[in-house]
């Protein structure tokens, strides 16, 4: 199946660089698929463990229709802008630059 995603450009470029240096760009789709499989496996394991231990499974959120008109893309963009650190990160990940 083919799909499209909106992903931070710097994050995507870093991911592509790491995958291509290990296994080549031809397997980029497979690398994404493996990460998705890992995420699903973790969720299934958590649900089964919660059944065995008789504790509630992790909270699941169901989408609701907004009561007022909203632009989710704009809102997410604003949240991302506010979440980026202005100083270089200790992790080495890209960060926003302060504008003059």
Image: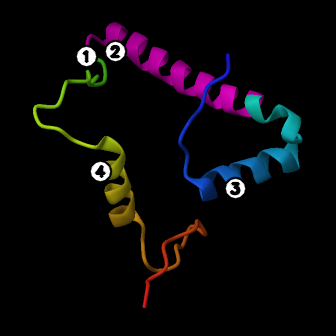
Give the image location of residue 52, x and y in percent: 36, 8
In magenta segment, residue 24:
no
Task: Name the residue at the bottom extreme.
Answer: 100
Which callout, 2 or 1, points at the residue further toward the start of the chain? 2
Q: Nearer the viewer, mark 1 or mark 3?
A: 3
Q: In this view, does 93 lie above or below 17?
A: below
Task: Name the residue at the left extreme.
Answer: 67
Residue beneath label 2, please? Answer: 50
Whole-number angstrom distance, CA of label 2 to CA of label 3:
35 Å
Whether pointer 2 and pointer 1 mark residues with C-beta atoms closer than 8 Å, the reply is: yes
Residue 75 — which label? 4
Q: Is mark 2 on a helix, strand or loop?
A: helix
Dot 3, crowdedness within 10 Å: few (<14), some or many (≥20)?
few
Give the image location of residue 11, x and y in percent: 61, 54
Residue beneath label 1, please? Answer: 55
Position of residue 31 in the picture relative to residue 20 (left or right): left
Whether pointer 2 and pointer 3 mark residues with C-beta atoms closer than 8 Å, the reply is: no
Q: Name the residue located 36 percent from the left edge and 62 percent from the top edge.
A: 83
Residue beneath label 3, please? Answer: 14
Q: Give the range drawn in magenta.
A: 30-56
Q: Is mark 3 on a helix, strand or loop?
A: helix
Whole-number angstrom distance, CA of label 3 to CA of label 4:
25 Å
Which callout, 3 or 4, points at the residue further toward the start of the chain? 3
Q: In this view, does 12 lie above or below 94?
A: above
């Amino acid at each position: 199946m083919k799909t499209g995603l909106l992903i931070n450009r710097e994050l995507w470029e870093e991911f592509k660089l790491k995958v291509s240096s290990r296994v080549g760009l031809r397997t980029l789709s497979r690398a994404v698929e493996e990460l998705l499989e890992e995420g699903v496996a973790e969720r299934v394991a958590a649900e089964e463990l919660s059944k065995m231990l008789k504790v509630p499974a992790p909270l699941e959120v169901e989408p609701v229709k907004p009561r007022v008109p909203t632009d989710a893309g704009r809102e997410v963009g604003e949240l991302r802008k506010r979440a980026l650190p202005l100083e270089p990160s200790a992790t080495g990940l890209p960060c926003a630059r302060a504008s003059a």
